[in-house]
Image: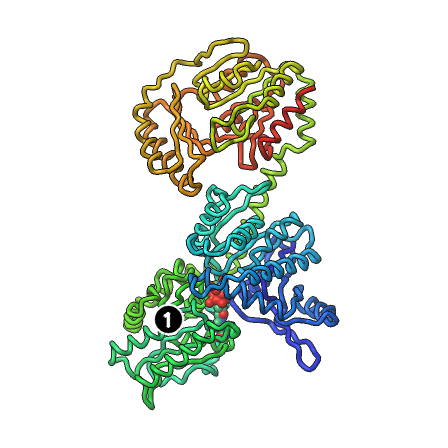
């Protein structure tokens, strides 16, 4: 198996000087983290025998040079370039990626630009990536796509290949209220794009939940424990907090004096490191440091803030504004508080060599990381890992993904300048033994869940979900060949039984249950099967016997109403009961159902003799999904001591007298005769009991591509009719 990583940028940067192309390994959290994982694959035994990386090399390459460049990249790295013009890349990178998605997903709607052309360009670049991938993809490849630049790629690829596709989002996924600000085309496009994957990973549980909620609210797909059933496959949504190469940071050997480390006139140093970005909360941090100086004159001359700011996205206006604001505030603080011997803020606007960065991590007393929003924040993890003396204090914003695993840090709300100021005091005063105690706990966690474990877990989960999908949808799918076998067995049998559910199986589910009357074609089909092949046919339903009598009472079939409370055997005119039932319990249950009906607009109650159904087809999908689960839970709890049962069907809860379920019903019919062919078809949850109670040689078929106890699945209700038509001679 080959693991193919796809990201916006390749892990190597291409440059062009004096007519020659040069390659340089690029830095950055994702690249260095994944490179460490890929290197570990070469050393350890794993299912993945090879890997490759596909992305943009960083500059545009003229058509005539492309083959030379491709050769150069291929022969030096296991990488494939995606050639894009600088113009298009600038438009997309500085457009939809960094003026729409980045601000919106980091909760800055006021910075967000909604421009149709940006969206069109974004689609275009995703298509170019798809075409490039198609030219290199092999059938044994697992594809792992990274980050917000390529959110449409999973679906574009899924339309063309059957390979496993994983997607990981490195930035936050916002709440529904923020995400829905995107125009309909792009918000649906992004969700559908991502759902082309088999596995979608996020840094935190919250981001996963926000994504699932958006999928429900915007596309209407429900999930079950993070799995979404799509036609022919299951999409899994899960949480994988990205780690770092702990050992590399912890054991890195640094020489004492590194260029770029401020000469330490002051006794204590507070460090901050980030890219220049409004999401990083750099201005608030400076304001917090200023308040600290204002409130604590005893620290003047004894502490400095060393701020490393890495230039980024210099082409976006809002970034230039922050840069101006930052320059001014640093100048103001140094002017107002500093003197000839002491400069409170040491500000470096540049990228430092890796070794210098680690030296800084190790030599500071406090790391002050206060993003207003950050998907993870690897700097926080690197800082803790680098402290092989176990000392140092981390102050971390509660709005970073990393805070979930670094809960022993001093956690601040980065919007609050006061909290930042007092956290600095608390950090500077923290005794050594407490620093060690906190860092040990965090280091232990970071060492266990490092970047290799993160990637291994992700790839493992991707393979696993593919196996589930394949088992459910390939092995169980009632293919044409299996359908022909079924018909063949049917024709060769002597005593045949067909048990079929009514709603969702014989007739489509409708928003208005009264509209589910059988069509003339359906009635003719049932009549035809009976006349030509004389099977015993049983129709199961949760409906009242009056409805069934009215709609299909003339059919040559046996009927069961109210989920088995009533039976009408073929050839008989009267409805009977398998065992005596009571409707006494209804008076206790109805008030509960009424309360939930009041809470859920569109919900309705249908009372029958021995059962009640609570329908919510017409209600708001998200509200009903939540309330129906709550009601089900409520009913199951209170009915534990009463003789009734609760079924959660498709947009309906059915409560009926106990003692009879579809399994019991099946046994009743099975005892009647010695059948040598049994076919049972159902769509609802309660049909699982039916499937379970059938003998081993029966054909059990579930309608809908979901997980089931049935031996086979069929994609939709219309296919049931096609199958039944095949049973006629
Ligand atoms: C995304 C998400 C998420 C920084 N300054 C220098 C330097 N760095 C390195 C650090 C670290 C990386 O850059 C920054 O990692 P972050 O996690 O903070 O952020 P990004 O990579 O920009 O962005 C983020 C991450 O993806 C991973 O999923 O955590 O939330 O926005 O590795 O060491 N490296 C060098 N000199 C510097 O001056 N050499």
> Is residue 626 toward the left or the right of residue 73 in the image?
left
Choose between 136 and 385: the one closer to the eye.
136
Res 494 visible:
no
Q: How is the image coloured?
A: rainbow
Q: Residue at x 48, y 59 (%)?
A: 242
Q: Point out residue 361 in the picture as x, y percentages from the top left corner.
A: 42, 73
Q: Point out residue 504 in the picture as x, y percentages from the top left corner.
A: 53, 29
Q: Residue at x 60, y 38 (%)?
A: 473
Res 718 visible:
yes
> Is residue 565 toward the left or the right of residue 536 in the image?
left
Q: Residue at x 50, y 32 (%)?
A: 510
Helix, strand or loop at label 1? It is strand
Name the residue that disc number 1 marks: 368
Choose between 450 and 711: the one closer to the eye.
711
Residue 729, by quadrant, is: top right
Q: Point out residue 25 in the picture as x, y percentages from the top left corner.
A: 60, 72
Mark 1 neighbour density, 10 Å: few (under 14) some (14–19) many (20 or more)? many
Q: Identify whether 296 is placed above or below 129.
A: below
Q: Point out residue 413 in the picture as x, y percentages from the top left corner.
A: 33, 64
Label 1 residue near ligand 1, CB within 8 Å: no
> Is residue 697 toward the left or the right of residue 631 in the image?
right
Exactly how many numbered labels are in the figure? 1
Choose between 135 and 316: the one closer to the eye.
316
Residue 268, by quadrant, is: bottom left
Residue found farthest to the bottom: 340
């Amino acid at each position: 198996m080959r693991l193919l990583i796809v990201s916006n940028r390749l892990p190597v940067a291409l440059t062009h000087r004096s007519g020659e192309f040069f390659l340089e390994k690029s830095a950055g959290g994702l690249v260095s983290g994944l490179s460490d994982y890929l290197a570990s694959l070469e050393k350890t035994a794993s299912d993945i025998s090879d890997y490759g990386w596909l992305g943009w090399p960083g500059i545009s390459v003229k058509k005539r040079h492309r083959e030379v460049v491709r050769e150069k990249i291929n022969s030096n790295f296991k990488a494939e370039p995606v050639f894009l013009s600088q113009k298009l890349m600038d438009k997309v990178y500085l457009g939809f990626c960094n003026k729409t998605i980045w601000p919106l997903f980091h909760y800055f709607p006021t910075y967000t630009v909604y421009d149709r052309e940006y969206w069109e360009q974004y689609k275009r670049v995703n298509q170019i990536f798809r075409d490039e991938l198609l030219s290199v993809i092999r059938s044994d490849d697992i594809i792992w796509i990274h980050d917000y630049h390529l959110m449409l790629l999973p679906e574009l690829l899924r339309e063309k290949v059957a390979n496993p596709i994983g997607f990981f989002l490195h930035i936050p996924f916002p709440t529904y209220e923020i995400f829905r600000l995107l125009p309909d085309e792009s918000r649906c496009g992004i969700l559908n794009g991502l759902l082309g994957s088999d596995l979608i990973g996020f840094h935190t549980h919250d981001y996963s939940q926000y994504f699932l909620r958006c999928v429900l609210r915007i596309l209407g797909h429900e999930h079950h424990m993070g799995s979404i059933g799509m036609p022919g496959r299951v999409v899994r949504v899960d949480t994988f907090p990205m780690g770092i190469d702990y050992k590399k940071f912890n054991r890195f050997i640094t020489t004492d004096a590194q260029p770029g480390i401020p000469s330490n006139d002051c006794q204590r140093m507070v460090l901050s490191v980030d890219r220049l970005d409004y999401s990083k909360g750099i201005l608030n941090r400076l304001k917090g440091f200023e308040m600290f100086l204002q409130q604590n004159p005893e620290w003047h001359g004894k502490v400095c803030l060393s701020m490393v700011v890495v230039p980024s996205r210099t082409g976006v206006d809002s970034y230039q504004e922050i840069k101006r604001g930052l320059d001014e505030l640093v100048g103001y603080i140094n002017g107002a508080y500093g003197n000839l011997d002491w400069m409170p803020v040491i500000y470096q606007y540049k990228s430092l060599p890796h070794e210098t960065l680690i030296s800084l991590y190790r030599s500071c007393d406090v790391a002050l990381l206060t993003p207003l929003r950050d998907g993870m924040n690897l700097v926080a993890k690197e800082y803790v890992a680098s402290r092989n003396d176990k000392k140092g204090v981390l102050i971390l914003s509660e709005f970073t993904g990393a805070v979930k695993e670094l809960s022993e840090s001093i956690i601040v709300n980065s919007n609050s300048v006061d909290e930042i100021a007092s956290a600095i005091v608390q950090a500077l005063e923290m005794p050594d033994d407490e620093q060690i105690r906190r860092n040990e706990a965090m280091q232990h966690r970071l060492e266990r869940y490092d970047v290799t474990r993160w990637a291994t877990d992700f790839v493992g989960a991707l393979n696993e979900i593919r196996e589930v999908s394949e088992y459910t949808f390939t092995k169980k799918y009632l293919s044409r060949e299996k359908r022909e076998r079924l018909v063949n067995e049917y024709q060769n049998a002597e005593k045949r039984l067909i048990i079929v559910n009514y709603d969702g199986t014989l007739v489509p589910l409708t928003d208005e249950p009264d509209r589910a009357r059988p069509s003339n074609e359906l009635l003719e089909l049932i009549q035809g099967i009976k006349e030509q092949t004389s099977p015993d046919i049983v129709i199961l339903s949760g409906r009242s016997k009056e409805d069934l009598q009215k709609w299909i009472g003339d059919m040559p079939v046996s009927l069961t109403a109210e989920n088995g409370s009533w039976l009408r055997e073929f050839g008989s005119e009267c409805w009977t009961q398998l065992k005596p039932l009571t409707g006494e319990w209804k008076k206790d249950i109805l008030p509960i159902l009424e309360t939930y009906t009041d809470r859920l607009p569109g919900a309705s109650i249908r009372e029958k003799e021995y059962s009640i159904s609570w329908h919510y087809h017409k209600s708001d999908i998200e509200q009903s999904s939540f309330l129906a689960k709550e009601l089900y839970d409520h009913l199951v709890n209170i009915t534990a001591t009463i003789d009734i049962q609760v079924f959660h069907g498709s947009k309906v809860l059915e409560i009926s007298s106990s003692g009879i379920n579809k399994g019991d019903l099946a046994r009743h019919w099975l005892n009647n005769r010695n059948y040598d062919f049994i076919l049972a078809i159902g769509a609802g949850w309660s049909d699982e009991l039916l499937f379970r109670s059938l003998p081993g040689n029966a054909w059990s078929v579930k309608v809908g591509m979901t997980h089931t106890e049935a031996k086979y699945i069929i994609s939709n209700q219309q296919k049931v009719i096609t199958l039944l038509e095949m049973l006629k001679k």
